[in-house]
Image: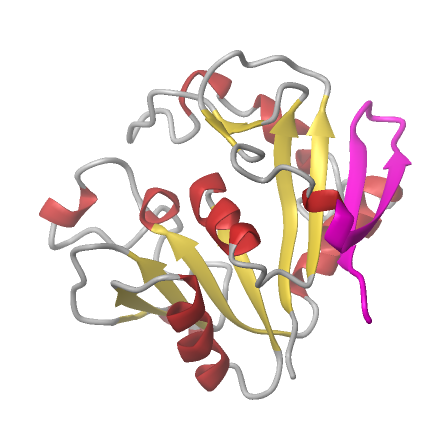
Amino acid sequence: MSLTRIHNLSISLDGFATGEPQSAEAPFGHAGERLHEWMFGTRFWDAGGTAGVDHAFAERHSHGIGAEIMGANKFGPPGWQDDPGWKGWWGPNPPFHTPTFVLTHRPRPSIAMEGGTTFLFLDAGPAEALEQARGTAGGQDVRIGGGPTVVRGFLAAGLVDHMHLVQVPIVLGRGVRIWDGLEALEDAYDVEAVSSPSGVTHLTFTRKRD
């Protein structure tokens, strides 16, 4: 069976994966771009970037993915459901290139974009969403793209096989935390940590097999 994977999810030292408040002008709230600066310098993000450890982890994001699941707050700022013309943050050719399921309590018709991305809007819990995504993934893996509330829901349901987090050395103090309600999550995973010269720590969680 295909795997369920999370990649390149950046968190602060105090566990926040986004700041607040989110808006069209500030998608990550008061965190700004600080959670993702480690990625901007990599060849994964920019052809002129570095090819070190940060790049090596970042580029795994793209391999073997047949579908993505994301939350409403990743697809757009608060209130996007009231804008029938909103098609996401990413312009006419989003970077997903697969069926991409957007979890929302207010579904709308699917949107086919350039480059193979189709946004499908679904009012469903983690298990049902994963079943539908796997049905479109052609036997490849399903990526849980965020935000932190969606990731936390899939982790709590025991549906994540592999997770890559990037701990960034900043303290946000407020926002949406990844760890709430996930006490002893580490018991179900083999956990590895790799430090980078950029100052971040790459944490990988791989589900233990019986």
Q: Residue 191 location, x and y as percent?
A: 83, 46
Q: How is this picture coloured? A: secondary structure
Q: Decide: is 1 above or below 199.
A: below
Taking the spot 16% from the left edge, 64% from the top edge, the residue there is 108
* Residue 118 falls left or right of residue 108: right
Residue sitting nearer the eye, 177 or 63? 177
The answer to which quarter of the image holds residue 19 is: top left
Q: Decide: is 181 above or below 100.
A: above
Viewer can see residue 50: no
Q: Residue 29 location, x and y as percent?
A: 40, 22
Q: How many marks?
A: 0
Q: Residue 186 location, x and y as percent?
A: 75, 44
Quadrant holding the C terminus? bottom right
Residue sitting nearer the eye, 118 or 43? 118
The residue stretch that appears in magenta:
187-210
Q: Residue 167 location, x and y as percent?
A: 72, 30
Taking the spot 68% from the left edge, 45% from the top edge, the residue there is 185
Q: Is residue 207 magenta?
A: yes
Viewer can see residue 24: yes
Quadrant holding the N terminus? bottom right
* Residue 133 falls left or right of residue 75: right
* Residue 57 falls left or right of residue 144: right
The answer to which quarter of the image holds residue 48 is: top right
Q: Is residue 201 magenta?
A: yes
Taking the spot 27% from the left edge, 65% from the top edge, the residue there is 121
